[in-house]
Each structure stands twice: as structure tokens, then as C-alpha cells.
Image (cartoon, rainbow, N blue to C red):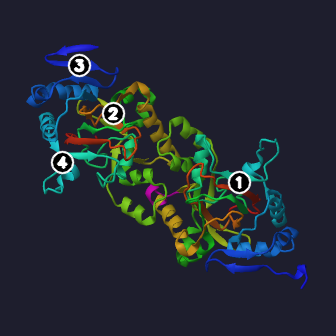
Amino acid sequence: MTMTETALRATDLKPLIGSRVDCDIDNLLSGRHAAEIRTLLAERVVLLFPEIGMTDEQQIAFTATLGTPAHENNGTVGPDGKPQAIYTVDAAQDDAHAIRRLRNNFLWHLDGSMHGTPILASILSAKRVAPEGGETEWGNTCAALAALPEAEQRELETLRAVHANWALQRHGNPEPSYAEFQQSRRGPSQSRPLVWQQASGRKSLVVGSTAAYVEGMDPLDSLDLLVRLRDWATQPQFVYRHEWKAGDMVMWDNTATLHRARPYELNCGRLMHRTMLMGEEPVG
Amino acid sequence: MIEAAEDLSLHHLTPYIGTRIEADADTLLSGRYAGQLRTLLETRGVLVFPEVGLDDDQQVAFTSTLGTLAYENNGTPGPDGKPQAIFKVSLDLQVTPMAKPLQNSLLWHLDGTTHDVPILASVLTARQLAAEGGDTEWCSTYAAYEALPDADKQALEGLRVVHSNLQLQRNINPELSYEAFQRARNSPSKSQPLVWKHRNGRKSLVVGATAGYVEGLPHDDSLDLLVRLRDWATQPRFVCRHSWKLGDLVVWDNTGTLHRALAYAPDSGRLMHRSMLAGEEPVG
């Protein structure tokens, strides 16, 4: 059997979410499995490459085989003046803003819900793991939607939610100063359909910590629905929880999942390197 | 400023709020100054009796000289089968099962906003101190209202705010399970005027950690107004802060103030004994 004929070996992690992919770095970097990986990602939404131990350069190259790499923060530049291809999620933080940003990851969310087109996928490599906590969890929002009664799905398809920075910031600080609140209110905000009807025919729920309210709904009913759907989508049968080992790499479909990190101590050493793929369709 | 008013020696702590009163236990228990103290309570908001060292029975007796004693949990019998006049305020679960909800005591609030008639006043004795932190702050919501521009005062006329236990739950946990959310949604909640027109002719702001939303306003404008007014009311000129000494007794007008404790460690030992005066008028 030649290399080109090598198929990916994929094993389900949970019935409704997650596959473990066994493949060596050379094969992944060659791009010959790229299409297969994209198909698998769409089906399984979370792919684990256990202890593969890619370097930054390898991770960047691998990411580029799968789509258009996205730079962090919509193209803001790093200390070297260049757009950052690798973003570090580092537990070593000392300023309040960075700590809040880190802790926002402890709540269920998808990335880019407040910005134009959310990213397609994230790829995260564990460089150092937390001695305690720091697991990552993903919930399959396609499977969760599909498991709702048909009539309810149709109903949800008619609704829109506003995803706003001020709602996210409020979670981290229930008592902001007015200046802080005004700043957060000037931040990004987007109205999204509650159900993302994707070009492929897939549908996913768009909820999580950035969801401020459902348009046109009474405040309590709005909150009720948002809490219920987030709780529904994060039930154990839809969730894969990963306990990191150094060198693990996980890729996830940001358009079909919510994710969160479990709490860990600041400065515990946990260090992750992330790359991303640009979104290919607006939430519609 | 020191005034001699009969035997009571008064020292105003700030222009708008807070007066220190040197008086011994016998003087307070005699009830001789009850009328004067009630007047001071309304005009000064917070009365500090340094190191007077009342025991529980004395504290209850003193409280009763000022009005109608209110019992905890609407008079639900405690472990001894009697209504509880003294409540132990502690963040330590070993001391009180209420430790977790009391995390909200670190946020600006007034008591009883979900009841028809909020309590008139609270009386607190410092029984054990935190080595670090644990000061209490009060702000005058009378003074804060009176200092608002006229245009603001007019704009606030007629507005109503829903205060709820749900909001308190969300302050502590931004990611409630749906079950916890439903429980909280079914727990006490009450719509109150944003501006309290007291029988004494003065007006005060009713905001703080229990305020969920302003009725009839868009979600973001509602939060904007609640944050702005709380921030306004708690600016330094309307605030007095007390660093506790053992045995200090403080009485405050719950209807014209917000209060909060500053952070302290749950295992610091800090313990306050609280008694209360029943409310005498609804928020109207």
C-alpha cells in the first residue's frame, strides 16, 4: 500500500460528537487527506489528534491545507508587527482585561458570534496542561437542534437573537461602572437567526454566553428560551469533554458547536496554541 | 462637626450620609432617644454607635425601641422553634447555609425589594472581624436622586423596575442550568417604581443588584439606565464607608440607601448579627 492510498483511521469518541483521528504529521501536512478531514469535521464536529505534537509551523501549514487561515482579532498585529497566525491561550495573565477574556472562555460560546462571519473552525494544540481543571468541552448544536420536536424547530427558525459584547461582559462583572458598561455597549453586537441554516443543509443552534436577548420577546421569556436552549445543547449526550495531554491537537467546527474550558487557576502553566479557519458563510 | 443634642453626641461622617453617635448600652436601651434616632435615621441614613457591644438580647431590645421588630424569613421558626430576630451574616457555609446567596451582599442593594413593603431598617453588630476587607459601604439614594438634573428626574417619572431573586441568582452564576433558572423564575419577584416617593415628601432611587429590568424599555437601554443610576448613586460624595471594630453597632435606613460589604475571605471569621425593623410603607 502506498502512502497516497492511506486512509484516515477515525474512531468515534461519543455517538453524537467527536472522532479520534490517527494519522502522522507528514500525512496531515501533505494535504492529501484535507477533503476527507473537512467531511469528517462536518459530520463529527470535533476531531482529536492525540499527542501528535505539532510545532507552530506545522500547525499553521496543516491549517492552510483545510481552508483559508484566519488571523486572530480580525487581523490585528502581534508584537512583531505582523498579523498573528498563532494565538496563545495562556493561563499566565496579570491584567484585568486579559483575565476577564480568559475567564469568558469558561462559559459556553461559539467564536465570532458578535462579529460578521464567524470562523469555520479552530485548531488547538496543548503545549502545557493545567495540573487541575482546564478540560475543554464541546456541545454539538446540530445534533441538539435535530433532537428537538419538529414543531419547535420550525418555531425557532422564525426567531432572532442579538449577540452583544455588553451581555458577555456582564457575565464577568455583574456590577460594572457606567464607563465600563458604555464601553462594552460600544463593542460588537449582531442580530443572528437562532437557527443557522447552512448551505450544506445542516442546521445548528446559535446560543451561548454572547446571546443577550431574543428579538421581540419579553425579557423573562427571552432569557428563559436562551437558558433552556443552551442547557439543552450542552446535555451529556451532545457533549464531548477532553482532558488534555501535552501535544494533543483538537480541531472543531465552530459553526456546529458551543465550547467552553473548565475552570483552571491563573498562572497554573496551561498554555494552548490556536489557529483558525476563516468562515465560509454568514449566519443565515 | 459636633453637636450636642441633649445627651447624644453627634458627629456627621460625610455631608450627605452617616452620623457617629457616642452612647452607651443603657442609654440606647432606655428608649429615651428613640424619637430623635428615628429622625436622624431618616435624615442621615446611617447611624454608627462605636463599640457599644450589645449582646443579642440587648440588640433585639434596642431595635424594638425604634419601631416594630421584623423577624427573619417572615417569622419562620428557627431551630429553637421560635421566630428568629437575629440573623448571622457570614460567607462561611459552616456558619450559615445562606453563605452562597450572601455573595450578593458584596453588590450594592437594598433589602426587601421583592416584598410588598421593604424593611425600614437594619441593625448590625460586629461579632467577629475579617483580618482583611469586610468594610461596609452605604450610599444615600435620597441625595443621589435629589442631585439628578431635572431632565433626568422627569424622564424617570413613571418608570418601573422588576426586582427578582432570579437577578440575584444570575449575579452569582451567569450560566444557570435550566432547572435552576426555572426555580429562580418562580421565586419572589416584584415590579417597583424606580423612584420611591416617600410619605416624608422626599424621593429616592430604587436600584441595585436585585433590579432585573426596566419595564417597557429595550433590553440594552434598560440595562444602561440601571447601571447608570446605580453608578450615579454610589459615587463617592453620596457614600460613607465603615471599617468595623468589634462591638460596633450600625443602624441604617434601608429605604433611603443602598449598601454593600467590601470583599473578604469566606473563612475570615467575619460575623455580623443582624436585626431588622419592619417596613412602614410600600415603595410608592
Task: Check contact, mark 3 vs mark 4: CB within 8 A.
Answer: no
Report the residue marked by disc 2. B204
Q: Quadrant of the N terminus of chain A?
A: bottom right
Q: Position of residue B276 (x, y in %)?
A: 21, 41
Q: Amino acid at mark 3?
A: Leu
Q: Position of residue B269 (x, y in %)?
A: 33, 44
Q: Quadrant of the C terminus of chain A?
A: bottom right
State the residue in front, B264 or A66. Answer: B264
Residue placed farthest to the bottom in the image?
Answer: A1
**Residue count near mark 1 (Cα–Cα under 10 Å), binned few <14, some 14–19, many ≥20:** some
- On screen, residue B125 above or below A44: above
User: Which secondary structure, mark 2?
Assistant: strand
Residues at discs 2 and 1 both on one chain: no
Mark 3 or mark 4, earlier in chain: 3
Report the residue marked by disc 3. B10
| Disc on res. B71 | 4
State the residue in front, A240 or B259. Answer: A240
Residue under mark 1: which chain is it in?
Answer: A
**Residue count near mark 2 (Cα–Cα under 10 Å), binned few <14, some 14–19, many ≥20:** many
Q: Amino acid at mark 2?
A: Ser
User: Which secondary structure, mark 1?
Assistant: loop
Q: Which residues are magenta?
A: A216-222
Report the residue marked by disc 1. A116
**Residue count near mark 3 (Cα–Cα under 10 Å), binned few <14, some 14–19, many ≥20:** some
State the residue in front, B266 or B234. Answer: B266
Which residue is at 25% across, 37% downward?
Answer: B124
Which residue is at 16% across, 38% downward?
Answer: B55
Task: Check contact, mark 1 vs mark 4: CB within 8 A.
Answer: no
Residue B162 in view (yes/no):
no
